[in-house]
Amino acid sequence: MKKKYMSLILVATFVLISFNIATAATRDTSGFPNWYTPYDGQVSIGPTYVEGRNLKWSQWRIDYYDSNDYWELEFRPRTGEPDDVWDGVDSLYSNLPGAYEEYDEDDVTVGTYSPDKLVSGTSYYGMVYMDWNSNSTDPFFIVESEKGLWLGVDGWPERYEYITTYLSKGSSTYW
């Protein structure tokens, strides 16, 4: 019986620590773009897609990454959730090394779990296509650049910064 309670306490402790770490990302508010964000790029939102293109990193930025890191470009509705705009993911097109997409209750993401394999000056892209929700609202989006620790299936965010806080569908922004 004592072992059962100890196991329960260990599991609860692990869950609490994991939640705390996962929500402890630092938002960088100065120096845009910070080292983990491409020095050049464009983000766009269409009725059936989100995309980052012409994403370029310099070698000194890539050198900060290691094989345990990830980088994400997140598109987050300012109000509501992605399901208020789209009906799930159809496909991902990307030339990012180790590219992946996420579609969850908070955002739509294109990312790489191998940012240490980026090549300096190469123009990268990532597009996530989705089905249009016919009951869709037209929210504004926050677009974030995020880096963190890759855990094999998902990651723990460590740092992020806003690329823009008011991107609407049918528009794009450059930096």
Image: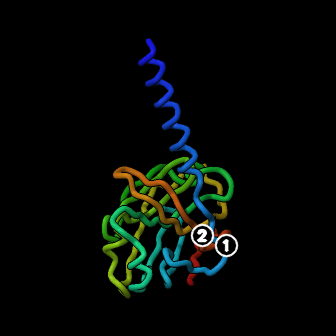
- On-image quarter of the C terminus: bottom right
Separation of disc 2 and disc 1 at Cα? Answer: 7 Å
Instruction: Name the amino acid type tagged 1.
Output: Thr
* Closer to us: 83 or 148: 148
Q: Which residue is mark 1?
A: 29
Image check: 11 left or right of 174? left
Q: Label 2: few (<14), some or many (≥20) within 10 Å?
A: many
The location of residue 171, given as percent across then percent down, is 59, 74
Can residue 148 be seen at all in this image of the molecule? yes
Q: Residue at x 45, y 57 (%)?
A: 130
Can residue 99 be seen at all in this image of the molecule? no
Image check: 6 left or right of 67? right
Image check: 133 left or right of 94? right
Instruction: Name the amino acid type tagged 2.
Output: Glu
The location of residue 48, given as percent across then percent down, is 48, 62
Q: Which residue is mark 2?
A: 161
Residue 120, placed above or below residue 73: below
- On-image quarter of the N terminus: top left
Q: Tag 2, which secondary structure?
A: strand
